[in-house]
Amino acid sequence: MKKISIDRLNELFAEIAASKALYMPVDDGKKGAKYSKWSEGTEYSKAANTARSAKDFFFPQVEDMASFNVNGKEIEVIDTREECEDFVVFGVRACDAKSFEILDSVYLVDPVDSYYASRREHGIIMTMACNKPTDTCFCSAFGIDAANPMGDVSCWMNDSELMLSANTEKGQTLLDSISILEDADDNAADDTKAAIKAILEKLPLSGLSTDGIKGKTLMEVFNSDKWAELSESCLGCGTCTFVCPTCQCYDIRDYDTGHGVMRYRCWDSCMYSDFTLCAHGNTRTTQLQRFRQRFMHKLVYYPENNGGVFGCVGCGRCLRSCPISMNIVKVMKTLEG
C-alpha cells in the first residue's frame, strides 16, 4: 500500500497528468459533481457521487462510428475512429466500478465491441471509498462494499492522508511510476474502512435485500398484477436510463452531411415508445410493458443469464433524478410483497 499527504494531492495529480490524461469529479456549482479533465488549479470534489456516472468514459452518449463518401454508384467507407489516449479516472465510487463489470459482460464478449474495448484497454480506474454516502445509496443490497471499492487502484481518504492500493497490473504500474508516493502498512486504511462501514450500516436503505426477488420465478415476477400500479405514474421520460451506470442500450443512425453520410450511435432507452418499433410494428405498445421490461432486465433477466449478478449497482441516481419519484427501490419492495 502507498500513501501521500492530503496537502500534496495537487502534486500527485500533476505527476499522473504528466503522462496520461487525468479526469476526476469537480464541483458543478449545483451542490453536485461532474467529471472534468484535470489541469493546474482543478480541485477534486468530495461530493458523494457525480450526477452522471463514469460510464461515459467507455461508452459515451454519442460517438461517430464511420462515414461514407458517395460518388455515383461508388461508396467509400471511412473509419473515423482516432487512437484512444491513455487516461486515468480518479475518484470513481464502488457502485460505478462494479458497473464496468456489467458493461464488460455485454461489450467484451463475442462479438467484441472494439470501440468500447479500446477505451477499456487505455483507461485506468482509481476508485475512492465513500466517506460520506447519501441516503439514496443502496449498493450493499447487491453485495458491493463502498468501504472497499474495486478498480485498478483503490483509494481511501481521511483528514490527513490518501492511501492507495493496486488491484491490477495496470494499477501497480501506475503506482510504481509515481515518485512522490510513500510506502504504507498494509492495514493503514483499516480505521478509515471501519468508520465508513459504521456510516453505511446507518443508511436508510442499508437493510434493502434482493431475497424477495430471488425467491420468485421469472414468470411469477413477469405476471405480477403490481406492474399496473407501479407503472401508472411513469412519464416514459427515460431519465432513469440516462443516469444509470449499467444501461447499455443504444441506437445507430445515419445522417446526410451534404457531402456524404455519417454513421453514429447514441444511447437509447427502453422507456421510449419507439424503442421496439420495427418495420412490422411495435412489440411493446404500453408504458406498463416498457416499465416492466426495464426492471425485469435489471432484477430478473440479467441475473438469470449472468450467474446471479444483478443489473443494478445501487448508486441511487434514479432515486435522485426521477421526476415522479418512481425508482428501482420502490419496485423491489413492492414485488417482494
Image (tube, grey):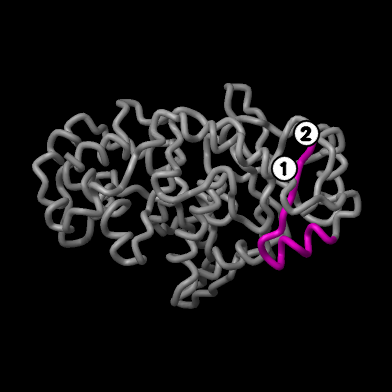
Disc assigned to residue 42:
2
Residue at coordinates 57% horizontally, 56% vertically from top-left?
58
Residue at coordinates 55% horizontally, 38% vertically from top-left?
197
Specify the segment rendered in magenta: 161-176
Q: Camera-side residue: 18 or 65?
A: 18
Magenta stretch containing residue 252, yes or no?
Answer: no
Residue 16 locus on image (x, y percent): 82, 51
As drawn, is 322 to the left or to the right of 228? right
Magenta stretch containing residue 174, yes or no?
Answer: yes
Q: Camera-side residue: 270 or 27?
A: 27
Q: Which amino acid does label 1 sit on?
A: Lys
Disc assigned to residue 315:
none
| Marks 2 & 1, CB-CB < 8 Å contact | yes
Residue 218 locus on image (x, y percent): 18, 58
Tell which circle, 2 or 1, labels the residue nearer the N-terminal end: 1
User: Picture quarter containing residue 4?
Assistant: top right
Instruction: For residue 248, say whether it is visible.
Output: yes
Instruction: For residue 282, say whether it is visible.
Output: no
Residue at coordinates 27% horizontally, 49% vertically from top-left?
211
